[in-house]
Image (cartoon, rainbow, N blue to C red):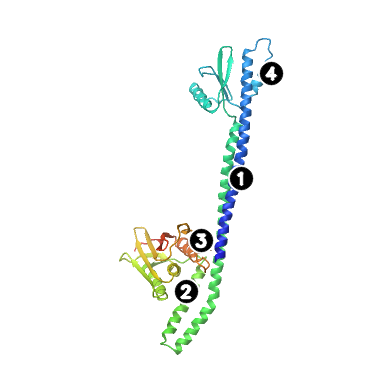
Amino acid sequence: MLQTNKLYQVKQQLKLVFIFIAIAIVAASTHFTNRLAKSLAIEEQKRVIIWAEATHQFIVANENTDISFLSSIIEGNTSIPVILTDAENRMISSKNIQEPKNNIEQFYSNEIVRLKNKHEPIVVKIDKTTQYIYHDDSLLLKQLLYFPYIQFGVIIVFLVIAFFAFFTTVKAEQNQVWVGLSKETAHQLGTPISSLLAWVDLLKSKHQDDKLIIEMEKDVKRLGIIAERFSKIGSKPDLQRVELNHVISNAVQYMSSRSSQKVSILCQFKTNETIHAMINVPLFEWVIENLCKNAIDAMDGIGSIVIDVTKNNHDITIDIKDTGKGIEKRNYKLIFTPGFTTKARGWGLGLSLVKRIIEEYHGGKIFVKQSEIGIGTTFRIILHKLDN
């Protein structure tokens, strides 16, 4: 069983390793992209300065100046948005700016403020006149800056899909294992149980009043019920409208008769009304017995178990409270995982089957309501209530 827990821990560690690798990939990619983006930003800054100087030279050029080269530099900027303003920050001209149809003046006023906060303006002095050039990052640079976050999102989506696929596959495999194991167990138990029943009938015919034979017959029939339970795992159970009070009382009576006298099992119905629910009796009795057995183990055979059954307008609540060792909060959900157990012996299947019976077969819920180390644990089952 310790080996089973170790395998569970290995699975958890592998998940953490995959997550760490994904984070490392994103971190390395982000670092590289940011370095590349900074280099590109510096290059764009230089291009804007060259563009500004070309604009300056174009303005002060006389009739003898060859402006073809200057024009090629000015026209060569097809990606970097720039706005040329006067000393009072009034827009003179712009390039690579997508203007709105309305409120153009207000638009440029807002853009100048935005670009001023983003990059230091380039000062252009022509004679005694001062002008400013404001520029934004090119579309290519913006895409490069956003790329790591897009990549991170893609990796997250990939991990979610991969985890979901892995979880679904593992769950399907586990279901096949549990179903196959359960049905094979029921099949293997069938022959010896039939044989034992025949021997019990033979003994009864010779010793009709022997109480030990009567008790033996009860236990053999109990084995038949257990085999029936195993045979139902993996099949859609037959739910019937039954009195929940009676079913729980039967399960408690069975556990009480086969437990130590130092263990007290008390069933409390906080209503005088009969509570009805749609359940499969053999499977639901298994749930109650399994929870009681776990409680007895947790109490080391000494203590008390109280089962409170209440109902409201919509639900039936069953609280099973023991005075055992308690469960650590971090294990509240893990205890329902197949293979997880804190016992030195066992397969860690009991509570996982309990959860499956309650949630998948009966459409209810089961969880640890409360637990304190050294004080005890309360499991809560919630079922849908039927109108009486």
In the figure, is residue 15 to the left or right of 378?
Answer: right
* Quadrant housing residue 310: bottom left
SS state under label 4: helix
Q: Give how far apart the Cα atoms at labels 2 and 3 are.
A: 25 Å
Tell me which residue sits at (49%, 22%) in the image.
109
Q: Give how far apart the Cα atoms at labels 3 and 4 are.
A: 74 Å
Q: Give how far apart the Cα atoms at labels 2 and 1 are.
A: 55 Å
Visible in this render: residue 385?
no
In this rendering, which labeled residue sits more in front, label 2 or label 3?
3
Give amino acid for label 1: Ile
In this rendering, which labeled residue sits more in front, label 2 or label 1?
1
Report which residue position mark 3 lands on: 337
Give amino acid for label 3: Thr
Q: Give how far apart the Cα atoms at labels 1 and 4 are.
A: 45 Å
Work out which residue is located at the far top of the displayed protein and give it. Answer: 63
- Location of the N terminus by quadrant is bottom right
Report which residue position mark 2 lands on: 225
Sooner in the amino-acid sequence: mark 3 or mark 1: 1
**Residue 133 at what x, y percent from top left?**
57, 21
Decide: marks 3, 1 in contact (CB < 8 A)?
Answer: no
